[in-house]
């Protein structure tokens, strides 16, 4: 046995695994789970996912592409009563009826039956750049909760995704409950887009 063992040139498992990095633990905070940024501002939408087992209030939270600099960017806040149930998603769109299912909130006041976010910052309105931009999501104390950055855009501490080039695709976080701050790892090119659904 001993001769057969050594003649087989065994490889010990610790040598194979010594550079292995374990996956990040599932997050316990809200995440941006999908973004569709092609088309007009009225056609763009963002999906936010609550991976926790409790509802989370959105009172005082803000979302947008405004990072304190830049041109034609906006930052918006949610109505005081807004919340995301446990293990659920919400959709925010330029025009809430331009996404299926219809969005829970919209950036522009197109539909009286869909609450409109309130602009609180920026020198422009909601509009995402195809070549590069970011969606930033802050809590009520203006602390960054999550961000997705792509293409030529940058944001401190976040590695951007290369971006997508096909107008019928979106950027989707996969799986939806991981967040490493490296968008090139956390997000994938999604076709067809899946608003209102998250991959487990």
Image (spheres, rainbow, N blue to C red):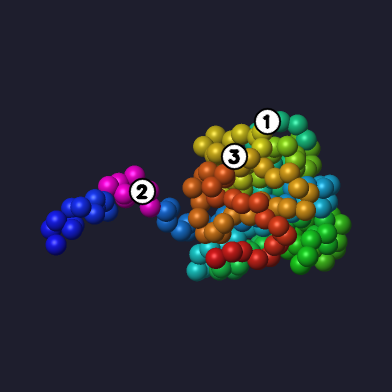
Residue pictured at 71% horizontal, 57% vertical: 191
Q: Which residue is mark 3?
A: 160
Find the magenta span and give its range.
15-22
Q: Nearer the viewer, mark 3 or mark 2?
A: 2
As measured in the structure, the alpha-carbon distance from the residue carrying label 3 to the one carrying label 2 is: 23 Å
Label located before the other in sequence (2 or 1): 2
Could you say where residue 14 lies in the image, as x and y percent from the top left? 26, 50
Q: Quadrant of residue 4?
A: bottom left
As measured in the structure, the alpha-carbon distance from the residue carrying label 2 to the one carrying label 1 is: 39 Å
Q: Which label is found at residue 20? A: 2
Asked whether residue 194 is in view, the answer is: yes
Viewer-proximal residue, 32 or 15? 15
Q: Is there a contact, CB below 8 Å, between mark 2 and mark 1?
A: no
**Secondary structure mainly formed by the magenta segment:** loop
Q: Which label is found at residue 69? A: 1
Position of residue 89 in the picture relative to residue 118 (left or right): left
Q: Nearer the viewer, mark 2 or mark 1?
A: 2
Q: How many marks?
A: 3
Q: Quadrant of the C terminus?
A: bottom right
């Amino acid at each position: 046995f001993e001769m057969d063992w050594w003649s087989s040139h065994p490889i010990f498992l610790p040598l194979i695994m010594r550079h292995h990095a374990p996956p990040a633990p599932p997050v316990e905070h809200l995440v941006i789970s999908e973004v569709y940024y092609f088309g007009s501002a009225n056609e763009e939408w963002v999906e936010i996912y609550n991976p926790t087992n409790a509802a989370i209030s959105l009172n005082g939270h803000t979302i947008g592409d405004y990072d304190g600099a830049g041109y034609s960017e906006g930052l918006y806040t949610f109505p005081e009563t807004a919340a995301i149930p446990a293990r659920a998603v919400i959709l925010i769109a330029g025009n809430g009826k331009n996404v299926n299912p219809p969005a829970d909130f919209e950036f522009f006041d197109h539909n009286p039956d869909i609450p409109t976010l309130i602009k609180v910052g920026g020198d422009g309105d909601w509009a995402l750049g195809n070549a590069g931009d970011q969606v930033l999501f802050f809590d009520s104390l203006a602390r960054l909760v999550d961000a997705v950055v792509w293409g030529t855009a940058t944001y401190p501490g976040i590695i951007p995704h290369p971006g997508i080039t096909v107008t019928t695709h979106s950027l989707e976080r996969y799986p939806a409950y991981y967040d490493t701050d490296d968008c090139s790892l956390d997000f994938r090119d999604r076709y067809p887009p899946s608003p209102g659904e998250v991959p487990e």
